[in-house]
Image: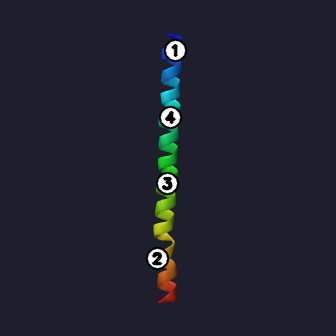
């Protein structure tokens, strides 16, 4: 029983970590995608 509870907590932490990393990655990806656009407009 205790082992199962420990396992579920571990998986929950892993899932939460993956979601957090995914959110950060998507934010940085959109930030990188958005950043060059204004600079291109200003340079042109």
Label 3 to label 4: alpha-carbon separation = 16 Å
Label 1 to label 3: alpha-carbon separation = 32 Å
Q: In the rendering, which numbered label is found on residue 25? A: 3
| Picture coordinates of residue 11, whole percent (x, y) | 48, 29
Q: Nearer the viewer, mark 1 or mark 3?
A: 1
Read off the residue under disc 2. 37
Q: Nearer the viewer, mark 2 or mark 3?
A: 3
SS label for mark 4: helix
Read off the residue under disc 4. 14
Q: Residue at x 49, y 75 (%)?
A: 36
**34 or 14: nearer the eye?**
14
Sequence-wise first label, 1 or 2:
1
Q: Nearer the viewer, mark 4 or mark 2?
A: 4
Q: Residue at x 46, y 68 (%)?
A: 33
Sequence-wise first label, 1 or 3:
1
Sequence-wise first label, 4 or 1:
1
Read off the residue under disc 1. 3
Label 4 to label 1: alpha-carbon separation = 16 Å
């Amino acid at each position: 029983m205790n082992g199962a509870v420990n396992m579920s907590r571990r998986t929950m932490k892993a899932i939460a970590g993956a979601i957090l990393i995914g959110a950060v990655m998507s934010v940085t990806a959109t930030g990188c995608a958005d950043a060059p656009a204004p600079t291109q407009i200003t340079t042109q």
